[in-house]
Image (cartoon, rainbow, N blue to C red):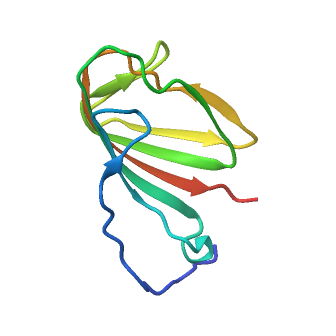
Amino acid sequence: MEHLQRKLVSTSTPKAQPGFLGAGHLASPVVMDDFSKTDPFIFLMDDVLDKKDTTPVGGPHPHAGFETVSLLLEGEIGDELHTMKKGDLQLMTAGSGIVHTETIDKIAKMRLMQLWLSLPK
């Protein structure tokens, strides 16, 4: 097996910004402009949710061509098929495409780290 070595050329400390789940969602993404310097890493996200109502957020959405590695650091998140609890790790391979849901329809407090990796061609 061939090993690839790279030199660390920069570091990034992201600032939390409003996330796509609305009020109470803060996301701290580490995203680089030049993907060729980070390949196969697409991004790393630190998601914090402090949802104070039962209005549904999230919902079905697609992924294709990458692997997600999700680590739940605090709280609980799930759907009718699977529930993640604190300390759980989830892998999802979205080769040619997948649609999944992460609807949250209850009061919730959680922290999730998610890493996206491109799949080999």
Residue in front for this viewpoint, 51 or 37: 51
Work out whether 22 lies above or below 103: below
For the C terminus, the quadrant is bottom right
For the N terminus, the quadrant is bottom right
Image side of residue 70 versus residue 108, left or right: right
User: Which residue is painted at 68% across and 43% down in the image?
Assistant: 64
Work out whether 25 lies above or below 13: above
Work out whether 35 lies above or below 105: below
> Residue 72 at what x, y percent from top left?
32, 38
Work out whether 55 lies above or below 84: above
**Residue 34's quadrant in the figure?**
bottom right
> Residue 73 at what x, y percent from top left?
26, 41
User: Which residue is painted at 26% across and 24% down in the image?
Assistant: 108
Image side of residue 44 versus residue 13, left or right: right
> Residue 69 at what x, y percent from top left?
47, 46
User: Which residue is painted at 65% across and 41% down in the image?
Assistant: 94
**Residue 107's quadrant in the figure?**
top left
Q: How many marks?
A: 0
User: Which residue is painted at 42% across and 84% down in the image?
Assistant: 8
> Residue 44 at what x, y percent from top left?
43, 56
Image side of residue 104 versus residue 85, left or right: right
Residue in front for this viewpoint, 23 or 5: 23
